[in-house]
Amino acid sequence: MSRTGVRPLGFSFLYFAPRIGQEHRPWFARAAHHGYDGVELPVNDASAQDLAFLRRAVADEGLRCTAVGFCTAATVH
């Protein structure tokens, strides 16, 4: 159950950037402050270090997380 007592509400960061990094960390606190239960993060070309940072940053704000990725002709091998 979400913190609002209804279906969880999430925010997709893909709208803002194709890749999320440390400079976006304050946005997670904002999402939590405004009542979001989780975030969806773009993870294209993310390294293991990037993913570890994102997991910690999201968890530190008490948020749940999903990920989105996409491919283009340039990324298909």
Image (cartoon, grey):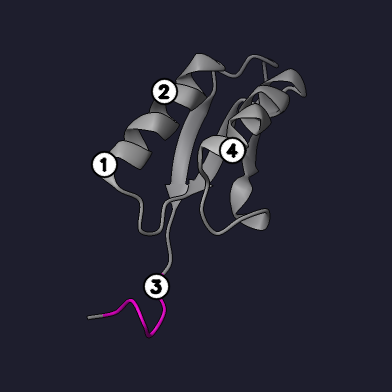
Amino acid type, mark 2: Arg
Closer to us: 21 or 35 = 21
Between the C-alphas of marks 3 and 1, the distance is 19 Å
- In the rendered structure, find residue 48 and report the number of the disc placed on it: 1
Query: Which of the two marks, 4 or 1, is nearer to us in this view?
Result: 4
Amino acid type, mark 1: Ala
Question: Which residue is disc 4 drawn over?
Answer: 23
Left or right, residue 77 beside residue 25: left
Q: What residue span does the magenta drawing correspond to? A: 71-76
Q: Position of residue 34 (x, y in %)?
A: 77, 24
Mark 1: which secondary structure? helix
Question: Which residue is disc 2 drawn over?
Answer: 56
Between the C-alphas of marks 2 and 4, the distance is 14 Å
Left or right, residue 72 beside residue 21: left
Q: Earlier in the sequence, mark 2 or mark 4?
A: 4
Q: Position of residue 70 (x, y in %)?
A: 43, 67
On screen, 60 above or below 72? Answer: above
Question: Which residue is disc 3 drawn over?
Answer: 71
Amino acid type, mark 4: Glu
Q: Earlier in the sequence, mark 3 or mark 2?
A: 2
Query: Which of the two marks, 3 or 1, is nearer to us in this view?
Result: 1
Residue 8, visible in the rendered structure = no
- Who's the residue at 69% across and 29% down the image? 31
Between the C-alphas of marks 3 and 2, the distance is 26 Å
Left or right, residue 21 beside residue 73: right
Residue 77, visible in the rendered structure = yes
